[in-house]
Amino acid sequence: MNVEEKVSDFYQQVLRRNAGEPEFHQAVSEVLDSLKVVLEKDPHYADQGLIQRLCEPERQLIFRVPWVDDQGVVQVNRGFRVQFNSVLGPYKGGLRFHPSVNLGIIKFLGFEQIFKNSLTGLPIGGGKGGSDFDPKGKSELEIMRFCQSFMTELHRHIGEYRDVPAGDIGVGGREIGYMFGQYRRLANQHESGVLTGKGLTWGGSLVRTEATGYGVVYFASKMLEAHGESFDGAKVIVSGSGNVAIYAIEKAQQLGATVVGFSDSSGYVSTPNGVDVELLKDVKEVRRARVAEYVAAAEGAEFHEGGNIWELAADVALPCATQNELNGEDAKVLAANGVRYVAEGANMPSTPEAVEVFREKGVNFAPGKAANAGGVATSALEMQQNATRDSWSFEYTDERLQKIMENIFTTCASTAATYDHEGDYVIGANIAGFKKVANAMLAQGIV
Ligand code: NDP
């Protein structure tokens, strides 16, 4: 079999074994596609069932999460934790609470996490988890009861050296707090290294809240710099208005950009004069309200209910909401409106068609597994601080984050060039992330 046939055979096996999981298929397909160039040069990476093992999680947990709502009615949700690959370190990856969550989505996220974590250069394996619980509209007590029930099952499967979850969509500092409290109670020990994203007085790290959004901008800055441009004076679109989006907006504006729009699932807000970040934080982090409330208090901002944010003109686009939020048509519109750089803050926000359009139109494109690795990298820094009972300053931690993002950029760029795909950060990220994991798997035998 030639490489093309081999890769197609691997992919067919994945489709057969994981029916009805389109997001997982999409994530695997993208990585396998990049690996063709590796297998041409280094065919031994297809030996020892390496690729089949890589595509099969080490362990998949699905569990019932019963809880009682404020009306006294029993609710039942489904919990997931996919422990995908621990060859480089304990499983590490966030928990997502969103009604769309299913096994295929958690597997796509866990699979991506393996390569992302490898790219950080830190000793962490890949995993992901969550639930189809919808935090929207729930009371504080309902959120707490749900988190406690979720952790009552999850606690037996995680630990400082085993699996260290963090936040993701729908899981922020509040939810991590409730889950940590329940873990501590059940385990009868204050094992701070078991979760990251904790509060600052009980083992959390400075910069963790900002890390993913800041990291995307640090990565994108290097990409712009490589083409003689910078954020200073640039117009930027940021989709979403959650944790990643808010801090991407903050950092881009600190570097002199104007963020011309942001969104949530109800529509987008155009902000031709830039975003008032403190107001946005108040609306989203304190009041937990919809973006329409931002518009009511901000001058010059306009709400476009149900509108498509990718219709705005800009130089840089940072999709920071969710998977497949930017399709081929959107990509064409972005390119036509002058966007020259796209860096993914969310996981897999661009569809394969969109990525193809970016390639065709010469739009520089940074995939999430490289560009949004700052969150998990800072989680690993939180683990380091927990292990040494230390807490670092904001400046020092931010400097470490910035260095890590710059290293990831350099690794992606140089790997792409080595494999004759200069400027293709998708190929660079996939190959560099893969080789480190693959070499460790080969060294550790067939397990
Ligand atoms: P949050 O829950 O804080 O925010 C998510 C944001 O995206 C909200 O504004 C939400 O709007 C919006 N959103 C979600 N679904 C949709 C949709 N279908 N259409 C339009 N908007 C939508 O999550 P995060 O900011 O933490 O995560 C955002 C992305 O970044 C995810 O892909 C996540 O996996 C990824 N990521 C997060 C990391 C982190 O450290 N938090 C690390 C690396 C990646 P609404 O409120 O209306 O639902």
Image (spheres, grey):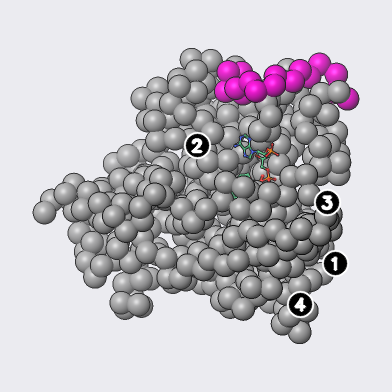
Q: Amino acid at mark 1?
A: Thr
Amino acid type of the residue tagged 3 in the rendering: Ser
Q: Can you tell which of label 3 and label 1 is closer to the viewer?
A: 3
Label 2 vs label 1, nearer the camera: 2
Location of residue 369 in the rendering, given as x and y in whole percent from the top left corner: 50, 49
Q: Which mark is residue 184?
A: 4
Secondary structure under the numbered disc 4 in the rendered image: helix
**Residue at image mark 1:** 201
Tell me the CA gap for discs 2 and 3.
Answer: 30 Å
- Residue 118 in sight in this render: no
Is 307 a magenta residue? yes
Indicate left or right for 226 with 71 as reference: left
Instruction: Give the spatial CA distance, label 2 vs label 1.
Output: 37 Å
Q: Are marks 3 and 1 in contact (CB under 8 Å)?
A: no
Residue stretch rendered in magenta on the structure: 297-312
Where, by quadrant of the figure, is residue 313 drawn? top right
Residue tagged 3: 139
Q: Quadrant of the C terminus?
A: bottom left
Q: The N terminus is located in which quarter?
A: bottom left
